[in-house]
Amino acid sequence: MKCSAYIAASADGFIARADGGIDWLEAAGKPEAGMGEGYVDFETYLGTVDCMIMGRRTMEKISSFDLPPEAWPYGHIKIVVLSNTVATPPDNLMNKVEMYSGDLHALLGKLEAEGHQSAYVDGGSTIQAFITAGLLDEIVITQMPVLIGEGKPLFGKTLRDVKLTDSRAVVCPSDYIQIRYRIENNTSSS
């Protein structure tokens, strides 16, 4: 199963403030200036996956938006939430997500057995866990033109060097820079 991530980060490498806030996303750059050729927007990316795996904190952030059904951005794709501490989702996500606690390889095997072929992995800790397990194949990072100084980093400590290949970058009129990497999943130490 192909696993990929699509995420925004500040220019200094954070995906959220220390308190989980993402208010800086809306204030960064000049989105009205456009994205330019080669930029992959969220809707286009979402059309390339058939399931989603997110972390508990990401689920809780989405729940806090309390989106009405017509604003739900994920369509009808299956969403699995990883958590070792929460067994049931918030009420407003009750029929939209499935909770999972366990081995990532087993989860991917279950999703493949259900016919899924391409998973969107979301949330800092979840992306890091997939990288550590050698399960993330590609990452698309939209670097936002803002420095927030501190917060939750996109990448944490790795147990080994992780080689990124086939890099592509798009510099947008909006001042966003979108970078796409394939991840070499060689689990030997470097």
Image: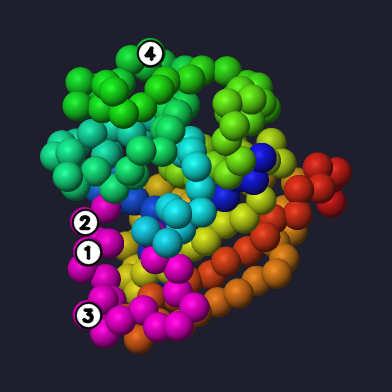
Residue 76 versus residue 56: which sits nearer the camera? Answer: 76
Q: How far apart are the two marked residues, 4 and 3, measured between alpha carbons?
A: 41 Å
The question of residue 39 being in magenta is answered with yes
Circle nearer the viewer, 2 or 3: 3
Residue 154 in view = yes
Query: Which residue is identified by label 4?
Result: 87
**Residue 78 position in % (x across, y down):** 43, 33
Residue 17 versus residue 129: which sits nearer the camera? Answer: 129
Callout 3 touching callout 1 (CB < 8 Å): no
Name which residue type carries label 4. Ala
Circle nearer the viewer, 4 or 2: 4
Above or below, 38 relative to 187: below
The numbered mark, 2 or 3, whose residue comes first in the sequence reads: 2
The numbered mark, 4 or 2, whose residue comes first in the sequence reads: 2
Q: What residue is rendered at 42% in x and 33% in y?
A: 79
Mark 1 nearby-residue class (10 Å; few <14, some 14–19, many ≥20): few
Tag of residue 26: 1
Query: Which residue is identified by label 2?
Result: 23
Q: What residue is rendered at 38% in x and 13% in y?
A: 87
Residue range of the region highlighted in magenta in the rendering: 22-42
Q: Within the image, what quadrant is residue 81 found in?
A: top left
Residue 174 versus residue 48: which sits nearer the camera? Answer: 48
Mark 3 nearby-residue class (10 Å; few <14, some 14–19, many ≥20): few
Mark 4 nearby-residue class (10 Å; few <14, some 14–19, many ≥20): few
Callout 2 touching callout 1 (CB < 8 Å): yes
Tag of residue 96: none
Please state if 180 lies on the left or on the right of 174 as rendered.
right
